[in-house]
Image: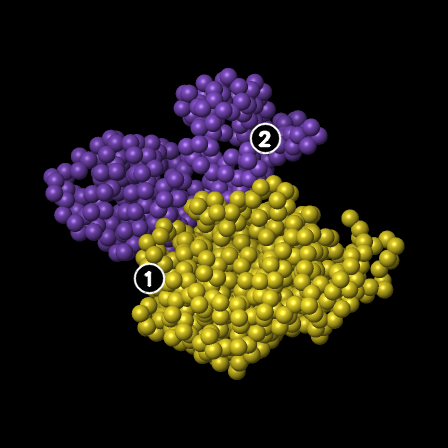
C-alpha cells in the first residue's frame, strides 16, 4: 500500500475549513492530510475523483455497537441475525450477520461502506467494560470510544450527597481511567437506580430511593464535575422519562437545570460550545398525556435550541423498521415489554447501572410510530443552527445505522418526505408539522451534521471531522457529483450514493472501493486520562478499598481494564491538577 | 439459550443479589456442592449494601426433589415430584396472578403451600431465581426455563425479580459471548454456506455427529466425550478427532491426536466470563511446563498451516 495518496478533482465539502463544494486536490502522507504539493506524484497513488462528492470520514456520536447489552441483542434475537447474513468476500473478506444488531465485523464493514470512520459506543457499564473493549477490538476499521455510564453510580451519589464535589470529580477521573472511557454518560439519572427496586423517577425533583438526591441535583453536580475536569466532550445525557407522552417538559426542564448550574464550557482539548449533549432527542420531544393524545413537540424543542447554543443534540430519528431497542434505562425497557408483549431482557449492574433489551417493530401504519418518525426529522429541520445537531438513529433504538443515507435523503428532499407522508398514518398531518416544513438540507449542512459538528462536540475537531492539513486522513468519496445532481429531485440517487461510498480512506489507507471493504485496518480507541490532584486521588482510593469490599462482587484489583484490551489506544491526557 | 430466545431474560450481576436480594430461590440447583463459594460470596450469607446482616436479611427457598445440602439451609423447602417442575411453575404463576387452582396438590406440593410461596414472592423487595441442571435436564427441558422466566417476568408486575442461570462449565458464557459478537449467533453456527447460519436441531454439534455428517472433529477446551449423548460419542470415536485441552479427559481418551495446553488463569492469562456475564481478567501465576503451548499459540500455528494449504 502506497504511503502517499493524491486525490484529484474532489468536490470537497469541509465546513470546519469553510470549504463548500470546491473542486480541489487532496494530499495524503503518513496517514494525514497534507498540502497536495507535498505529495510526490511519482511515488503516490493518484486517484481522479472526477468531481465526486468528498467529505471527511463520518463521525457517529451515539450508537450502540459494542458491549454486553448489544451482545444480549445478538444472543437473544437469532431472528434478527437471520434477516441479514453476509457471506465471505461479499462486503469484505469475512462473513457476518445481523440487521439491527450486526456482528462486530459486519458493523465495521457497513459503517465503512457509508464512509463513516469514527463511531462512539454510547454506553458501557463500567463493571463490564472489558467486554465492550473486546468487541471494539474485534470491530475492523473504525475508530471508537466507550462512554462510561455514571448517571446512577452509588459512589458518585455518596460523594455528592456528602458535598464532596472534588472527590466526586477525582473518582469520575479514576473511573474513566479504570474503564478506558471517553465520556461521562448519564442515562435516566436516578431512574435506573430506582429500577433496582422495580421503580422509576417521574420528575426532576423526585428523590432517588435511599440516596436523598434528585435528578436535578445529579445533573448539576455532574456538569460541574465535567467542566472541572475539562473533558473534551460535555456530559452526554439521556434524560428521564424517555418515550413517555408529555416528556418534552422534563427535557426542557433538564436543560434548564443543567444551565442553572452556572458553568461554562471549559474543555482542555477542542472548542466545543455546549455544556450538555442531549442524545436521541426525538424520544424526548413528546406532547400529550397518553398514547391517545400523543403529539409532536418538536417545535418547542427546536425553539429552545435556537435560543441556547450551549445545548447540542443528536436526533435518534425513527426509520420505521423492525429493530432492537437497548438502553441502560432499565425501567423503560420494562415499559416497552409491557406495551408490546415482546420478549424482555434486563441486566442490572451492581453499584453502577442497569439495562434492558426488547425487540421493536416501528410501523408506518401505527399512528404513534408515524408521529415519532416525523418528530426526528422536524427537530433536524426546525433547529436553525446545524452545528447543534447530529444525525443519528440512536442505533439500533430508533432504527439501524445503515439507514443514515435514507435519513439524510429525507432531510435533503421535501418531495421524498412528501412521498413518505403519503405512506404513514394520518396522525402525522394532525399532530406533527413535518408536512408544513419546506427546508431542505444542503450538502454543507449534511457535512456539518454527520462529521464536523460531532467532531467539534467531542472535542476532536483538531484531528477528525475535517480535511485540513494535519487531520487524520479519513476521507469519504461518494459516487455522486454535486454539480450534476439536485438532491431534492434525485433523492433516490442521493440515498444510493451514500449507502455505498465510491472510495473510503482511513488513516491514509484505502479501505473501501466501490462499496466493498478491501482492507481491514485496526481502529484506534480514544480514552481520556485525566490527571487530578494526588492528595484527593489518594483519599478516593482509600475510600474505594472499603467501598469495593462492601458493594462489589469483584475485587478492586480486578476491576480496571488492562492495557492489553486496547491494541491501538489513543490516550488523551488532560491535566486537571491545577483546576481543583 | 433456546428459552431466552423465546421469552427473554430478566437478569442482573451477582453483586446486585448481594446488595439487594431479600428473597432467593434455588430451583434444581445445589450450590452447596456444585458452586461451593457462591452462597457465601454473592448471595445467601453475603452482607450487602441493603442487606447488612447477610443471612438474617434474606429468605431462602429451595425447590428440589431431593433434600440436598442446600435444601437443608432453606427457610422454605419445596419437594417437587421429579419431572413435574413445569406443572409447579405454572401453578405458582397462577397463584401469583390470583387464579384459583382447582386441585389439592400440584407436583406433590399442597395448593395452600403454593399460595403461601406465591405471596412470599410478591412481598419480596428484590427477588432472585437461580436455576441449574435440575430444571434444564428434567422433563420439559428448555420449556421449563421458558415457564420459569415467565414467572419472574410476571412477578415484575408486583415487585422486582431477576434470574441467573447457575452455569457449570468454566467460561462457557465467554464462548457464547465471543461467538455471538463474531458471527451473530451464540452456538451451533454452521459456516458451510460461506455465511453464519444457526438452526439448533440441524446445526448443533450433537446434530452433526448423530446424523453422521461430521467426518472430522476438533475439540478445544471442552469435554463432549463425557457429556454428549451416546450416539454422538460413538461417531466421535469413528472419525479423526483432535483434542486440545489442559486436562486428560474422556474426549482425550477417544482422540487420535491430543494436544496438551497451558491452563488459562494459572499458567497463562486471558479473559473468562462469569455466569452473570461479567468478564474477568485471568492472570498467569506460574510458568507452564517447558514446551507447553497455550490455546492461542497452538491455534495460531494451525491457522498458519491452513493458510499455507
| Image-quadrant location for residue A96 | top right
Observer-nearest of A59 and A292: A292
The percent position of residue A335, horizontal first and vertical second, equals: 34, 60
Which residue corresponds to mark 2?
A: B262
What residue sits 69% from the left and 47% below the top? A519
Would you call the spot at circle 2 few (<14 residues within 10 Å), some (14-19), or many (20 or more)?
many
The percent position of residue A124, horizontal first and vertical second, equals: 51, 56
Mark 2 or 1, which is nearer the eye? 1
What residue sits 65% from the left and 68% below the top? A485
Whether residue B149 is situated above or below residue B205 in the rendered picture: below
Observer-nearest of A128 and A55: A55
Which residue corresponds to mark 1?
A: A199
* Chain B pictured colour: purple
Q: Does A351 sit left or right of A26 as displayed?
A: left
What residue sits 45% from the left and 44% below the top? A78
Whether residue A170 is situated above or below residue B272 in the rendered picture: below
Would you call the spot at circle 1 few (<14 residues within 10 Å), some (14-19), or many (20 or more)?
some
Instruction: State which chain is coloured yellow.
Output: A
| Color scheme of the displayed model | by chain
Q: Does B282 sit left or right of B10 as displayed?
A: right
The disc placed on residue A482 is none
Residue B113 visible somewhere in the drawing: yes
Q: Secondary structure at mark 1?
A: loop
Quadrant for the C terminus of chain A, please.
Answer: bottom right
Chain holding disc 2: B
Observer-nearest of A177 and B240: B240
Whether discs 2 and 1 lie on one chain: the answer is no
Whether residue A559 is situated above or below residue A268 in the rendered picture: above
The percent position of residue A192, horizontal first and vertical second, equals: 40, 61
- The CA distance from mark 2 to mark 1 is 47 Å
Amino acid at each position: 500500500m502506497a504511503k502517499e495518496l493524491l486525490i484529484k478533482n474532489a468536490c470537497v465539502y469541509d465546513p470546519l475549513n469553510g470549504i463548500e463544494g470546491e473542486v480541489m486536490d487532496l494530499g495524503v502522507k503518513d496517514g494525514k492530510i497534507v498540502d497536495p504539493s507535498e505529495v510526490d506524484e511519482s511515488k503516490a497513488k493518484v486517484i481522479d475523483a472526477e468531481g465526486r462528492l468528498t467529505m471527511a470520514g463520518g463521525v457517529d456520536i451515539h450508537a450502540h455497537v459494542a458491549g454486553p447489552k448489544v451482545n444480549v441483542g445478538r444472543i437473544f434475537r437469532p431472528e434478527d441475525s437471520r434477516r441479514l447474513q453476509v457471506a465471505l468476500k461479499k462486503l469484505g473478506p469475512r462473513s457476518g450477520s445481523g440487521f439491527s444488531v450486526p456482528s462486530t465485523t459486519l458493523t465495521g464493514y457497513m459503517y465503512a461502506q457509508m464512509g463513516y470512520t469514527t463511531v462512539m459506543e454510547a454506553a458501557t457499564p463500567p463493571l463490564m467494560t472489558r467486554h465492550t473493549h473486546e468487541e471494539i477490538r474485534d470491530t475492523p476499521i473504525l475508530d471508537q470510544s466507550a462512554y462510561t455510564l455514571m448517571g446512577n453510580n452509588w459512589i458518585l451519589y455518596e460523594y455528592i450527597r456528602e458535598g464532596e464535589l472534588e472527590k466526586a470529580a477525582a473518582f469520575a477521573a479514576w473511573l474513566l481511567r479504570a474503564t478506558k472511557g471517553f465520556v461521562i454518560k448519564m442515562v435516566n439519572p436516578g431512574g435506573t437506580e430506582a429500577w433496582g427496586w422495580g421503580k422509576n423517577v417521574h420528575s426532576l425533583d423526585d428523590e432517588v430511593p435511599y440516596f436523598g438526591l434528585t435528578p436535578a441535583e445529579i445533573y448539576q453536580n455532574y456538569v460541574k464535575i465535567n467542566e472541572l475536569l475539562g473533558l473534551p466532550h460535555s456530559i452526554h445525557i439521556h434524560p428521564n422519562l424517555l418515550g413517555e407522552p408529555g416528556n418534552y417538559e422534563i427535557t426542557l426542564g433538564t436543560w434548564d437545570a443543567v444551565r442553572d448550574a452556572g458553568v461554562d464550557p471549559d474543555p482542555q482539548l477542542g472548542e466545543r460550545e455546549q455544556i450538555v449533549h442531549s442524545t436521541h432527542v426525538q424520544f424526548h420531544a413528546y406532547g400529550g398525556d397518553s398514547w391517545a393524545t400523543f403529539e409532536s413537540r418538536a417545535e418547542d424543542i427546536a425553539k429552545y435550541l435556537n435560543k441556547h447554543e450551549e445545548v447540542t443534540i443528536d436526533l435518534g430519528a425513527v426509520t420505521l423498521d423492525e429493530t432492537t431497542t437497548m438502553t441502560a434505562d432499565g425501567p423503560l425497557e420494562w415499559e416497552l415489554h409491557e406495551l408490546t408483549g415482546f420478549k424482555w431482557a434486563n441486566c442490572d449492574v451492581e453499584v453502577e447501572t442497569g439495562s434492558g433489551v426488547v425487540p421493536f417493530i416501528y410501523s408506518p401504519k401505527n399512528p404513534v410510530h408515524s408521529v415519532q418518525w416525523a418528530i426526528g426529522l422536524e427537530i433536524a429541520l426546525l433547529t436553525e443552527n446545524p452545528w447543534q445537531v447530529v444525525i443519528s438513529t440512536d442505533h439500533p433504538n430508533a432504527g439501524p445505522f445503515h439507514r443514515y443515507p435514507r435519513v439524510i435523503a429525507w432531510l435533503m428532499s421535501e418531495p421524498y418526505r412528501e412521498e413518505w407522508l403519503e405512506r404513514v398514518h394520518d396522525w402525522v398531518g394532525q399532530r406533527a408539522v413535518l408536512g408544513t416544513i419546506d427546508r431542505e438540507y444542503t450538502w454543507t449542512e449534511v457535512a456539518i451534521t454527520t462529521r464536523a459538528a460531532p467532531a467539534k462536540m467531542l472535542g476532536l475537531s483538531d484531528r477528525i471531522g475535517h480535511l485540513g492539513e494535519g487531520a487524520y486522513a479519513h476521507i469519504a468519496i461518494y459516487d455522486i457529483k454535486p454539480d450534476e445532481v439536485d438532491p431534492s429531485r434525485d433523492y433516490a440517487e442521493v440515498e444510493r450514493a451514500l449507502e455505498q461510498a465510491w472510495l473510503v480512506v482511513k488513516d491514509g489507507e484505502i479501505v473501501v472501493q466501490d462499496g466493498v471493504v478491501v482492507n481491514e485496518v485496526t481502529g484506534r480507541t480514544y480514552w481520556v486520562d485525566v490527571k487530578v490532584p494526588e492528595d484527593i486521588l489518594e483519599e478516593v482510593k482509600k475510600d474505594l478499598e472499603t467501598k469495593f469490599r462492601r458493594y462489589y462482587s469483584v475485587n478492586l484489583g480486578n476491576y480496571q481494564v488492562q492495557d492489553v484490551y486496547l491494541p491501538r489506544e489513543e490516550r488523551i491526557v488532560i491535566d486537571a491538577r491545577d483546576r481543583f | 439459550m433456546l428459552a431466552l430466545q423465546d421469552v427473554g431474560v430478566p437478569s442482573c450481576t451477582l453483586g446486585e443479589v448481594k446488595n439487594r436480594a431479600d428473597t432467593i430461590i434455588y430451583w434444581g440447583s445445589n450450590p452447596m456442592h456444585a458452586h461451593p463459594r457462591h452462597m457465601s460470596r454473592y448471595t445467601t450469607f453475603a452482607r450487602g449494601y441493603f442487606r447488612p446482616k447477610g443471612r438474617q436479611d434474606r429468605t431462602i427457598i429451595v425447590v428440589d426433589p431431593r433434600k440436598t445440602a442446600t435444601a437443608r439451609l432453606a427457610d422454605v423447602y419445596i419437594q417437587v415430584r421429579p419431572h413435574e417442575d413445569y406443572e409447579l411453575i405454572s401453578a405458582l404463576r397462577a397463584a401469583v396472578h390470583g387464579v384459583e387452582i382447582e386441585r389439592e396438590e400440584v407436583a406433590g406440593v399442597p395448593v395452600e403451600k403454593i399460595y403461601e410461596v406465591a405471596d412470599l414472592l410478591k412481598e419480596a423487595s428484590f427477588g432472585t431465581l437461580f436455576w441449574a441442571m435440575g430444571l434444564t435436564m428434567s422433563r420439559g427441558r428448555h420449556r421449563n426455563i421458558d415457564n420459569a422466566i415467565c414467572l419472574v417476568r410476571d412477578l415484575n408486575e408486583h415487585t422486582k425479580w431477576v434470574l441467573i442461570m447457575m452455569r457449570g462449565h468454566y467460561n462457557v458464557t465467554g464462548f457464547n459471548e465471543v461467538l455471538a459478537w463474531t458471527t451473530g449467533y451464540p452456538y451451533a453456527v454452521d459456516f458451510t454456506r460461506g455465511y453464519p447460519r444457526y438452526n439448533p436441531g440441524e446445526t448443533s454439534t450433537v446434530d452433526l455427529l448423530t446424523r453422521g455428517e461430521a467426518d472430522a472433529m476438533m475439540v478445544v477446551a471442552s469435554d463432549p466425550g463425557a457429556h454428549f449423548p451416546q450416539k454422538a460419542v460413538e461417531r466421535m470415536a469413528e472419525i479423526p478427532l483432535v483434542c486440545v485441552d489442559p486436562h486428560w479427559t474422556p474426549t482425550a481418551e477417544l482422540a487420535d491426536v491430543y494436544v496438551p495446553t497451558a491452563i488459562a488463569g494459572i499458567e497463562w492469562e486471558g479473559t473468562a466470563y462469569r455466569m452473570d456475564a461479567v468478564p474477568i481478567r485471568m492472570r498467569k501465576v506460574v510458568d507452564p511446563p517447558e514446551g507447553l503451548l497455550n490455546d492461542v499459540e497452538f491455534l495460531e500455528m494451525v491457522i498458519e498451516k491452513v493458510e499455507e494449504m
